[in-house]
Image (cartoon, helix red, strand yellow):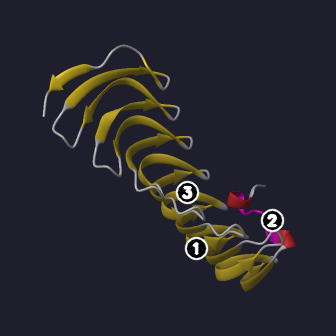
Amino acid sequence: QAEDGIRDVERSRGLGQCVGCLLHGQGTLTSTSGYTYEGGFVNGAPSGQGKMTSISGDVYEGSFQDGNLHGQGRRTFANGNVYDGKWQSNQRHGHGTLTYQSGDIYEGEWQHGKEHGRGILTYKSGDIHVGEWQNGKEHGQGKFYYTNGDIMRVSYEHGLQHDTCTLLRKG
């Protein structure tokens, strides 16, 4: 399975209590594919609270279930992006905040690893976009709040501006 799924326990080297030759309880695992995991195990799979460091330099600290990132957790990516929020089966799912290395911040709903539902995108400049996302793209009605005081209503369809912007207030 993929690096995030850390299920190659039988080909890995681990330190911890062995039940039927599967790690169980607290332990440390170094996989043959290069990641390390420290935390809880149930029947050989990372479960409960733990910390995973990938060979690429990504670090995840949080909840695991059956070897998957699942529940509340924080992942710091090697490129500098940081996601703090809910996970389901190794994907961002539920409410969370992604802080980009650029300084932009998206806070809102996620589904299957993509922005989906209501969200707020705050740009490094201080401008703010409040709106709806679908499959990782702006979709539906939204508003832009600019640092100069302007407020614009916008409409998107699958990431593309659907019609002209409407100035709601001049700053």
Q: Position of residue 101 (x, y in %)?
A: 48, 59
Q: Position of residue 63 (x, y in %)?
A: 52, 65
Quarter of the image holding residue 29? bottom right
Residue depicted at x 33% and y 15%:
164
Q: Is residue 6 above or below residue 51?
A: above
Q: Residues within 10 Å of mark 2 (few under 14, many from 20)?
A: some
Quarter of the image holding residue 44? bottom right
Q: Position of residue 45 (x, y in %)?
A: 70, 67
Q: Is residue 111 magenta?
A: no
- Pick whichever of labels 1 and 2 is earlier in the sequence: 2
Say which residue label 3 marks: 70
Q: Position of residue 133 (x, y in %)?
A: 43, 32
Q: Is residue 24 above or below residue 158?
A: below
Q: Which mark is residue 51?
A: 1
Where does the magenta region start and end?
Answer: 5-9
Q: Which mark is residue 8?
A: 2
* Horizontal arrangement in the rendering, residue 66 relative to residue 143 (left or right): right
